Amino acid sequence: MHSAGKPLTQRSFRDVLGRFTTGVVLVTARTVDGPAGMAANSFTSVSLDPPLIALCAARTSTTWPSIRATGAFAVTILGDDHEDVCRTFAARGTDRFAGRTWTQSPAGHPLLPDGLGWLDCEIDTVHRAGDHELVIARATCWSTAQDRSPLIFHSGRYTRLAS
């Protein structure tokens, strides 16, 4: 029981963690079966020297295994006008790359040309972490692009920064 007298459940744990505001990214790769991608809000910087990032991927993901198998991926940081893109990449059973213009990172991975920034990454280590995999990757190339507000995820919904 927690202090409010309610049982500790997976839902209440998720609700508490949802109070932590995050940005949202696309994780994309050129795989043997074509482009693959997923949305992620569990993304963070780890180290400047060497340049490392971390993200978490659900072990139930049908997309992550094909990205992991390539050993590398690109990250596009989403802007506040990318909510529809994020929803598409969070959905199952849809062609996530249809109807949009894509560019390629230097390593050949798909990038949204109007993202806030991007990174090319090579997977360093993958750790099993409960129902997710914790991925540590080395950024090999990166760039800032657009200078506008990020897409924000808070309490289970997309929102924007106040001006």
Image: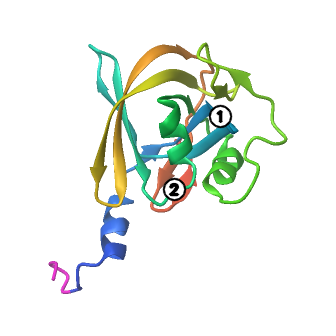
Left or right of 110 in this view: 71: left
Q: Amino acid at mark 2?
A: Ser
Q: Amino acid at mark 1?
A: Val
Q: Is residue 17 magenta?
A: no
Residue 78 tag number: none
Above or below for 69 versus 20 = above
Near mark 1 (Cα within 10 A), the count class, few <14, some 14-19 or many ≥20, is: few
| Pick the front one: 149 or 38 | 38
Q: Quadrant of the C terminus?
A: top right
Choose the circle earlier in sequence order: 2 or 1.
Answer: 1
Above or below for 16 versus 72 = below
Q: Position of residue 119 (x, y in %)?
A: 51, 22
Give the residue at x 54% y 38%. Answer: 67
Give the residue at x 50% y 46%. Answer: 65
Give the residue at x 69% y 45%. Answer: 85
Left or right of 130 in this view: 157: right
| Pick the front one: 129 or 44 | 129
The span shown in magenta is 1-5
Dominant SS of magenta comes to loop
Q: Quadrant of residue 79?
A: top right
Name the residue at the front extreme: 32
* Disc 1: which residue: 32
Q: Quadrant of the N terminus?
A: bottom left
| Pick the front one: 109 or 33 | 33
Q: Is residue 4 magenta?
A: yes
* Disc 2: which residue: 61
